Amino acid sequence: MALRERYINPYTDFGFKKLFGTEINKDLLMSFLNSFLDTKEAITSVKYLNSERLGDGVGDRRSVFDVYCETEKGEKFIVEMQKAGQRYFKDRSVYYSTTPIREQAQQGEWNFRLENVYTVGVLDFVFPNNEYPADEYYHVVKLMDVADKHVFYDKLTFVYLEMPKFNKTEDELETMFDKWMYALRNLSRLLDRPKALQDRIFEKFFNQAEIAQYNEEERREYETSVKNYRDYINTMDYAHDNGWKEANVENARKMKADGMPTELIAKYTSLSIDEIATL
């Protein structure tokens, strides 16, 4: 497969882990997290943990994270690039968060004190059913008291970034968070580093993202990752389109049974006259 881009696609498994999940690039991860996390103190040190976690018992389901790390204070971070919406995506986020919670258990006497746990989802899709307004792409979720809306427990935090909603131009970038969102959203389409991203951290970011400096093995891994990403997106698009068509076919059947003219059925369902005739 011939790669024409200058920079890698961060939405691929290889791309995201290369930029944020390697020891040499931990400063990129810290800068990215510090740009949007409302922590008491800035993250100044992280240690990468094994991203594959097995269940406690035989036959338990394993968890595989894109990036799993902890700070020197013991705070745990799961950072995931989610390529497409899933039916139980929220369930998956909650399930993943249980790993860093359970791993804090101590043998013997223990008072159950826990350190902060953060699950960050970088989403290559938009939450369905207009759950959030079209111009809101940054969401922080905590356990809340339903009656008076106060945060009941502040040590478990879920952060979701709806990347397709971020449409700021280079001239509109103001904060470091804006810059990171722009860099991730547009990286694989860029030919050069934008003038608005002249911070030292982005010099390294673009150097690490440049495909030409990878060795042969890394290029093969990236090419495979790009193929898997495109296959996955195509599969999801096909499933979405088929679901759309099945719904319209069912509606067309009902309209036809009610005696609605074929031309109107075609107008409202986008099915062809020939397709409607076979129903």
Image (cartoon, helix red, strand yellow):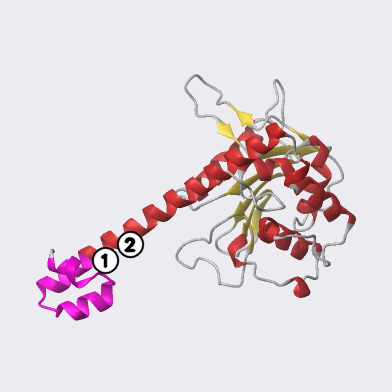
Query: Circle 1 sits on which residue?
Result: 248
Mark 2 residue element: helix
As displayed, is residue 20 above or below residue 132? above
Image point (13%, 64%), residue name: 278
Left or right relative to 266: residue 218: right
Image vertical order of residue 234 relative to residue 126, above or below: above
Q: Is residue 7 visible?
A: yes
Taking the spot 60% from the left edge, 67% from the top edge, the residue there is 165
Which residue reaches farthest right?
200
CA separation in Å, label 1 and label 2: 6 Å
Report the front residue among 168 and 271.
Answer: 271
Q: Classify 10 Å Cα crowding around label 1: few (below 14), some (14-19), many (20 and above).
A: some
Residue 270 falls within the magenta-colored stretch? yes
**Residue 155 position (above or below residue 185):** above
Secondary structure that dominates the magenta span: helix
Q: Which residues are magenta?
A: 250-277
Tell me the number on the disc at residue 133: none
Quarter of the rendering containing residue 167? bottom right
**Amino acid type, label 1:** Asn
Mark 1 falls on what kind of element? helix
In x, y percent, where is residue 202?
Answer: 83, 55
Count every numbered label the image shows and give the total: 2
Q: Which residue is mark 2?
A: 244
Q: Are marks 1 and 2 in contact (CB under 8 Å)?
A: yes
The residue closer to the viewer here, 32 or 268, is 268
Horizontally, is 178 left or right of 95 in the view?
right
